[in-house]
Amino acid sequence: QVQLVESGGGLVQPGGSLRLSCANSGTSFSIRTMGWYRQPPGKQRELVAALSRDGRANYADSVKGRFTISGDNAKNTVYLQMNSLKPEDTAVYYCRYEARFSGMEYWGKGTLVTVSS
């Protein structure tokens, strides 16, 4: 059974940094894509960053140059380093893994990031 658990969220002042982590506490599996999504209050969930198996990363325009995604496929872990945070980055952040062979997707339960002075 796959169980993704995010950590690292919290309250931070504008301009500050946070590092989110996502780990699979269940059975490890081969991953095609690892990604981070977020859902701001009252808005739809959106892609923040994704990391493919071959190491290619892509980012939402709103976070380019400020956020960095990294991960370890074998360890089923993914990270999101967030710098120069802005109030509009406030959201619940979710990790998502797509299985390499089945294509199934798995989601964590989310971690809240609040950027406020």
Image (tube, rainbow, N blue to C red):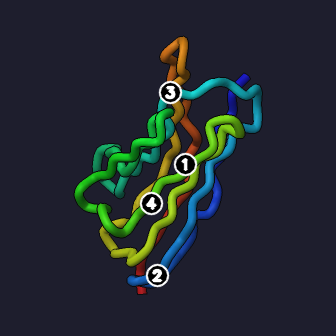
* Residue appearing at x 34%, y 75% in the figure: 86
Q: Which residue is mark 2?
A: 16
**What whole-number distance in Å separates the C-alpha atoms at marks 1 and 4?**
18 Å
**What whole-number distance in Å separates the C-alpha atoms at marks 3 and 2?**
31 Å
Q: Helix, strand, or loop for circle 3?
A: strand
Q: Is residue 95 above or below residue 31?
A: below
**What whole-number distance in Å separates the C-alpha atoms at marks 2 and 4?**
14 Å
Which of 44/69 is in front? Answer: 69
Q: Residue furthest top?
A: 102
Residue 68 is tagged as: 4
Q: Helix, strand, or loop for circle 2?
A: loop
- Image location of residue 14, percent across then percent down: 39, 83
Residue type, numbered disc 4: Thr
Mark 1 vs 3, N-terminal side: 3
Q: Helix, strand, or loop for circle 4?
A: strand
Residue type, numbered disc 1: Gly
Residue 32 is tagged as: 3
* Residue appearing at x 28%, y 52% in the figure: 60
- For marks 1 and 3, give the one nearer the viewer: 3
Q: Which residue is mark 1?
A: 110
Which of 6/99 is in front? Answer: 99
- For marks 2 and 4, give the one nearer the viewer: 4
